Amino acid sequence: MIRKIDKKTVGEALRAAYDHCKTESGGKNADYIPYLKNVAQNLFGIAACLPDGSLMTVGDTDFRFGIESVSKVPTALLAMEQYSDREVLHRIGADATGLPFNSIMAILLENDHPSTPLVNAGAIAACSMIKPVGDSSGKWRSIVDFLTALAGSPVEVIDELYRSESDTNFNNRSIAWLLKNYGRIYDDPMMALDLYTRQCSIGVTAAQLATVAATIANGGMNPLTHKQVFRPELTPRIASLMATVGFYEHTGDWLFQTGLPAKSGVGGGIMAVIPGVMGLAAFAPPLDTAGNSVKAQKALSFIAQRLDLNIFHTTRCVMAEPAPAEA
Ligand code: GLU
């Protein structure tokens, strides 16, 4: 069954989700990165980007927050674009760990690969793969240029967040060296760690994240700039990674309830990809115990239900073609 929805219906769903969730007070800001602890708790925004380039927003969708783990998605895509999806599967893998995002135990248990580029270990391994290998500033340019192309607008590091993460990332340092020990890092480990830390410290808005999600949903064609950013066959690959591990040890619960491939970050952002239909993003800093924004989850789950966006549902939601202009 097909359900056609239009822009107006999407706008109403965003507004209703905002009203439904704005008083939600559960969760607390990440505090293991000092900068994140001090971000205003009541910020809240929701954005949708449609294949025709319409960007619909409600709330604090222009506030720049730390992209954090959502950055694992663009870098995994870039690695697949620079090498191939098979090479990323071979060197990193695609299995959910079922363990926290920064788990060292997961590396010890999976002794042949870091498991998936969407947890810290796999993301540091992905940074080590990014070309040009051996050239830190060249690699950084590749990462930033790729994210900018996905978002359709410039992004930059929040310096204070980068300093805050670099001063406290002891667990990630252990991960990088452990990967080196197992031959699962493909460049200098401390260079890979620094690139990973820097990419997590990039500031984005919810509107930008929705555009990144829409570019992925649109087979790599950015709906705002019309630029083809990556090969269309990578959309199902990255969407499947997001579906299997996007919320760490809460991923199964999320997928069961919403049916949305999505990725969260400890900065409070979540982006969801509905292939062929739209990109969604929500942002609110307080997190649940696994590190996923409480309010953003609630808002996206509300929208998924209202618009029948569950990708496993027998009703397939599609955007209606706009009516032809009057003569
Ligand atoms: N920079 C954070 C870390 O490595 C990202 C974690 C997340 O957003 O899940 O701990």
Image (cartoon, rainbow, N blue to C red):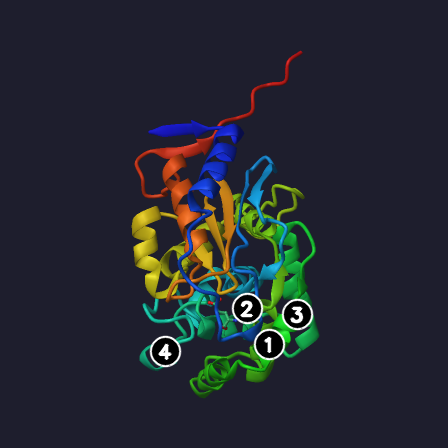
Which label number is shown at residue 140?
3
**Would you call the spot at circle 1 few (<14 residues within 10 Å), some (14-19), or many (20 or more)?**
some
Which-is-in-front pick, marks 1 and 3? 1
Measure how far apart labels 1 and 2 are at the Cα level. Answer: 9 Å
Q: N-terminal of the two: label 1 or label 2?
A: 2
The residue at 53%/26% (across/down) is: 321
Q: Quadrant of residue 101?
A: bottom left
Label 4: which secondary element:
loop
Measure how far apart labels 4 and 2 are at the Cα level. Answer: 34 Å
Q: Position of residue 315 (x, y in %)?
A: 33, 33
Mark 1 highlights which residue?
A: 164
- In the image, what residue type sits under mark 3? Trp
- In the image, what residue type sits under mark 2? Leu
Looking at the picture, tell me which residue is in the foreground, 325 or 284: 284
Which label number is shown at residue 209?
none
Q: N-terminal of the two: label 4 or label 2?
A: 2
Which-is-in-front pick, marks 3 and 4? 3
User: Mark 2 and mark 3 in contact (Cβ < 8 Å)?
Assistant: no
